[in-house]
Amino acid sequence: MDSPDEELMLAYGGGDAGAFETLYARHRGGLFRFVLRAVKEHGAAEELFQEVWVRVIEARERYAPKARFITWLYTIAHNLLVDHWRKKGLSLVALDGDDVPNESANPARQAEAREALARLVHALESLPAAQREAFLLHEEGGLSVAEIAAVTGVGEEAAKSRLRYAMTKLKAAVDDG
């Protein structure tokens, strides 16, 4: 199904369970990685991830496409994460070391890739929470600056600055190797 997400969500609200399956398949990977990197604990990430989809299911009949579906979806995730952080005091983001691409059999290149990833992980964890979230929404969610602003409840200039600062810091950290 190549239908836009918004049409799929409306179809799901009308009773088309297959439309939900398509939406879930499209967005589960990026959404789960976003949540996991935000909370750093696999179990907590799974619970929050499932809660996002529960909220989508609960909202199916009242969903109205006022923005892109993905913006709406990540807004739900953002709000759940804010609640989670408030309850647990968590604000760090982690990348799993297993994310290193295994494209090259060259051990030196693999070691170099692991070192670059370690620098990126450290830099990502060192970012202020607002910059880290802007970066992850952009990279994992594919959200635009305007969508990041809508999800996080800030102006577009603030979202743009957060993303720009995050990208600059992360690039410098990886390039410093």
Image: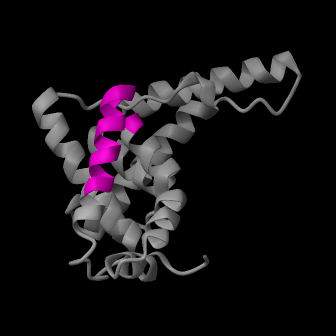
Q: Which of 93 and 87 lies nearest the eye of the viewer?
A: 87
Q: Up-down: is 167 above or below 71?
A: above
Q: How many marks?
A: 0
Q: Which of 120 and 39 lies nearest the eye of the viewer?
A: 39
Q: Quadrant of the C terminus?
A: top right
**Residue 135 magenta-drawn?**
no
Q: Could you say where residue 139 lies in the image, as x and y percent from the top left? A: 50, 52
Left or right: 83, with 170 as reference point: left
Q: Could you say where residue 90 lies in the image, as x and y percent from the top left? A: 22, 28
Q: Which of 141 and 161 lies nearest the eye of the viewer?
A: 141
Q: Which of 177 and 2 lies nearest the eye of the viewer?
A: 2
Left or right: 170, with 41 as reference point: right
Coloring basis for residues: one colour
Q: Could you say where residue 145 lies in the image, as x and y percent from the top left? A: 39, 66
Q: Up-down: is 13 above or below 111?
A: below
**Residue drawn at the location 55% of the way across and 36% of the way down:** 172
Q: Could you say where residue 160 lies in the image, as x and y percent from the top left? A: 37, 62
Task: Tell me the chief SS of the magenta region.
Answer: helix
Q: Quadrant of the N terminus?
A: bottom right
**Residue drawn at the location 49% of the way across and 70% of the way down:** 18
**Residue drawn at the location 11% of the way across and 36% of the way down:** 86
Q: Up-down: is 120 above or below 76?
A: above
**Residue drawn at the location 66% of the way across and 22% of the way down:** 114
Q: Residue 45 sits in which quadrant?
A: top left
| Residue 140 visible, this orientation | no
The magenta segment: 36-54
- Which residue sits furthest left? 87
| Residue 154 visible, this orientation | yes
**Residue 37 magenta-drawn?**
yes
